[in-house]
Image (spheres, rainbow, N blue to C red):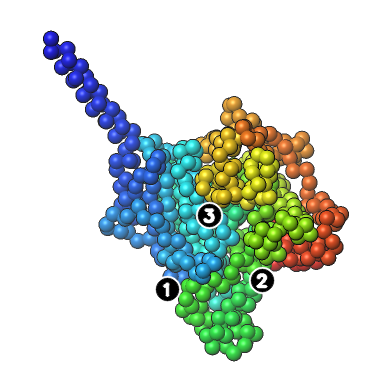
Amino acid sequence: MFKIPMKKSLLQTSTAVFLLISIWSSSAYAIDHIIETTNGKVQGSTQQSLVTWTGIPYGKAPQGELRWKKPEPVSQWSETFDATKPAQNCIQTSQSGAIGTEDCLNLNIYRPDDNQKNLPVLFYLHGGNNQTGTSAEFNPQLVATELNAVIVTVNYRLGALGFNPLQALNTGDKIEDSGNYALLDIKLSLDWVKENIAAFGGNPNNITVSGFSAGGRDVMAMLISPIFENSFNKAIVFSGGMTTANKNQAEQIFADRLAKLVVRDNKKPTLDLAKAWLLSGSPDVKAYLYQLPAADLATLFGDAGIRMSQFPHLYRDGVVLPKNGFETNAYHSVPIIMVTGQGEFSLFARGDKRFAGAIADGSLATNTRLLNQYDFANKYGSLFYSLFNVNQSAQKMYPHYKAPIYGVEFSLGSDEVVTGSQLAPLGSFHGIFLALWDKTKFSPFTQELVKLEGTKDVRQKFNGYLANFLLNGVPSNKGQIEWKPWSPENEQAGESLLVINANKTKSIIYMSNKPYQYDDVVALIEQDNTVTPEEKQQIITQVLNGRWFSEPLDKQFSHKETQ
């Protein structure tokens, strides 16, 4: 009578034990977060569906004698490193002054909470004009699982600590003397990842380098930098085109900015004498610069507003970056995706001093004259910027590039009926893809957008393309709209650019092209009568001038940008 219940109880117990073992074995990373690296052990933690390791050092603190030097690999540590705390961020300018620390060469690693191995690796560089930003630019909770990848985000030197062209800092090491210290940090971090990522379940032979805005421009620079040869397998560039700076001209600009500190510190009595001294290459200059507080250097340039003339960086030194920049024929030809939004300039127009006050107090909507000026700046800035992010780069690369180039443009966001009144004036703004990865980004502008079924469909399909690309270098898969690579033939046929939009319930995705060039935009500007000639000239020379994308406009209207 009692044997049958006993057997049933035993069966239930065995099943429960089996389930516990299964859960343990399929979530090995969730149980044991301690990973052995080449430098020592690191302790991670579980964050919902992810296992994370944050703030892992890859280089020694670039401070003191190491301030403007090639980054040195981090030393071994004997105790287990606590990688459960937030990373220390690089010192940078902010509205409240300098924040962060020079001891910041570290990275974060995120992976799905399971025991998969050989996952593709997404190596991500944050935005911020190479002046600001952190490795915590977005919450990877959603995207790491949807991409089924190991995600690595990196901190690297910023501002005048990440780039400095002054000859006084030269040591005789040609790579070090490039002045491109941030790129050297990125190279060291990438080397560390290639050497260690297998221990975290990543495939060191399947690394996709990616970045947003400044990070994207850094990735573009990596494509032409000899020091990055054979360092990565694919690339994704989010809103980042081709930018480099003339090192000699950059040195003049740095000397102008630093001269104020020299006079402040009574090293020289006038700005002219201070500048001449800074350009002299004297050992005394080097000693002076090394003793300056990091906060003075971090805040030296303020907010450069995507203007190379305000903070020149990515120097064409002839070693780390070629003298002829992107005119080179030598690219690291890996499959690449280049991403833009249709409304790329909207946030920058919004933040420009000409409009910022009226936007802050809500008067822009009722000031017809100023609103017309804002719409003018936003329209033409976005036409230029979106062209710069994809087509201009693709056209220049294509004759010399031996791998597929894929372009994509987001056009969702500008329909108020679909996305709400907060987002409509911004449209597909600079960085809109981040709202698909992290629902909290850019709130409240995107709070209605991220709730829509159409947006969820966009996220699923866009991340599906990216997951395919990370895995095998081709974004399209069966059941998806075929994403054709960029080529002159596909451009002519109207099929060179994947366009992503959505209504309230579903995504709208199709192949198209960019039906205009820079000269066409300049012609439209000249014909535009929505603002007065005086207002037009002011917007061109004060709002649109000197931006990454502005060279044709500046030439046409005689406002020169640093080359």
**Viewer-proximal residue among 510 and 180:** 510
Say left or right for 202 vs 43.
right
Which amino acid lies under the numbered mark 2 shown in the image of this protein? Answer: Gln
Image quadrant for the C terminus? bottom right
Residue 494 lies, in percent from the top left, at 75, 36
Could you say whether the residue bearing mark 2 is in a helix, strand or loop? helix
Residue at figure coordinates x 33%, y 51% from the top left = 42
- For the residues carrying marks 3 and 2, which lies nearer the camera in this image? 3
Q: Which mark is residue 126?
A: 3
* Residue hosting label 1: 64
Structural distance between the alpha carbons of marks 3 and 1: 25 Å
Residue 516 lies, in percent from the top left, at 78, 46
Structural distance between the alpha carbons of marks 2 and 1: 27 Å
Could you say whether the residue bearing mark 1 is in a helix, strand or loop? helix
* Residue hosting label 2: 249
Say left or right for 360 vs 87.
right
